[in-house]
Image (tube, rainbow, N blue to C red):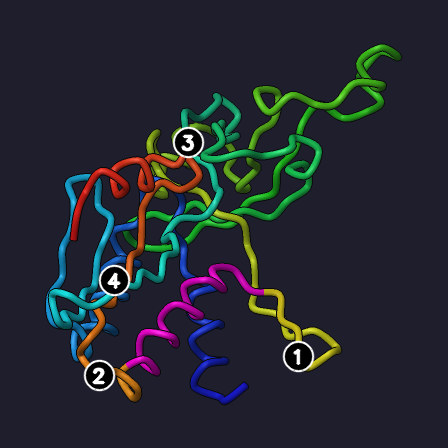
Amino acid sequence: MNEKTMDMFRTLTEFPSASGFERELRGWMKDKLSAYTDEFVQDRLGSLFGVLRGEESGPKVMVAGHFDEVGFMTTGITETGMVKFRPLGGWWSQAVLSQRLEIITPDRRITGVVGSTPTHLLDESQRNKPVDLNSMYLDIGADNRAEAESWGIHPGMQIVPICEFTPMANPKKLWPKRGIIVTALDLHLNWLKRCTKKNCLTRFMLVQRFRKNWGFAVHVRRPI
C-alpha cells in the first residue's frame, strides 16, 4: 500500500463522524472529489453523490459507502459532573464499559472514560447481569455540572470512540474505520485512468447508515 493511501486511511480513521453528525466529513470528501467529478448531488438527508457522466446508453456503476460511524450523543450532565449519553447505532453494552470516548465540542475534544456503579456496590443479582447503557456515564474529570457546562458541554453533542489508526504486525492488514470510503475513493480516482466515458460512475456516500439504514432507504428511491 502506498503512503498516500495509508495517510487517507489514517485521516478517515481518526475523523469524528457519528450518525447524524456527518457534515464535516462530507465537506472533506467533497473537497477531495471536486477535481475528479462532473457534478455533485446532495439529498435532503445529507448523502452525497459524486457523478462522472458517460454515454446515456452505457452501464451505470455505483461505488457506495457511508460517512457515519457508531457513536453516542450527550443527553445530560449530573450534579456531580458525569455526562449521560445515548447510543447512535448498535452497541453491545458490555463493549462500552471502560471505553475512552471523546465529546466533540466546537472548540476542542474532551476525553472521558465510561463508568458505572462499582461492582462492590452491587448485590449478587446485579453483578450477574449485563450493565445497561442507561446506567453508564462518561467521566470527564469535571467536579460538578457547572464545570462541565463551562467546558462547552450540553445535550445533543456527538461522542465518538478514541480509535487510533493502527497498522497490524502483518503489513497487509490494518485496523481502520471507514475502509470502504478509502476503497471507494481509490476506485473512483483509478477509474479515471481507464474511463472511456461509456459508463456513468456514481460515487455514493450516505449518511445515517447506523440509524436503520436511513441513507440507503432514501437513495434506492432516487434515480441519478
Please tell me in which quadrant of the rendered image residue 27 appears.
bottom left
Number of marks in picture:
4
Please, what is the three-letter code of the amino acid marked with disc 1? Lys
Seen in the picture, residue 147 relative to 127 is either above or below; the reply is: below
CA–CA distance in space, label 3 to label 2: 37 Å
Labelled pair 3, 2 in contact (Cβ < 8 Å)? no
Please, what is the three-letter code of the amino acid marked with disc 2? Thr
Chief secondary structure of the magenta span? Answer: helix
What label sits on residue 60 in the rendered view?
4
Which residue: 13% across, 61% down?
40
What label sits on residue 212 in the rendered view?
3
Seen in the picture, residue 65 relative to 93 is either above or below; the reply is: below
Looking at the picture, how far across and down is residue 163, in whole percent?
A: 56, 58
- Whichever of callouts 1 and 2 sits on the residue coming sooner in the sequence is 1
Q: Which residue is mark 2?
A: 196
Please, what is the three-letter code of the amino acid marked with disc 4? Lys
What label sits on residue 172 in the rendered view?
1
CA–CA distance in space, label 3 to label 1: 32 Å
Please, what is the three-letter code of the amino acid marked with disc 3? Lys
What span is colored magenta in the figure? 176-191
SS at circle 2: loop
| Label 1: how many Cα within 10 Å (few below 14, some 14–19, many 20+) | few
Label 3 vs label 2, nearer the camera: 2
Looking at the picture, how far across and down is residue 138, in whole percent?
A: 55, 35
User: Closest to the observer: 93 or 46?
Assistant: 46
* Residue 156 belongs to magenta span: no
Q: Residue 89 vs residue 121: left or right?
A: left
SS at circle 1: loop
Please tell me in which quadrant of the rendered image residue 130 appears.
top right
- Whichever of callouts 4 and 2 sits on the residue coming sooner in the sequence is 4
Q: Residue 149 vs residue 47: left or right?
A: right
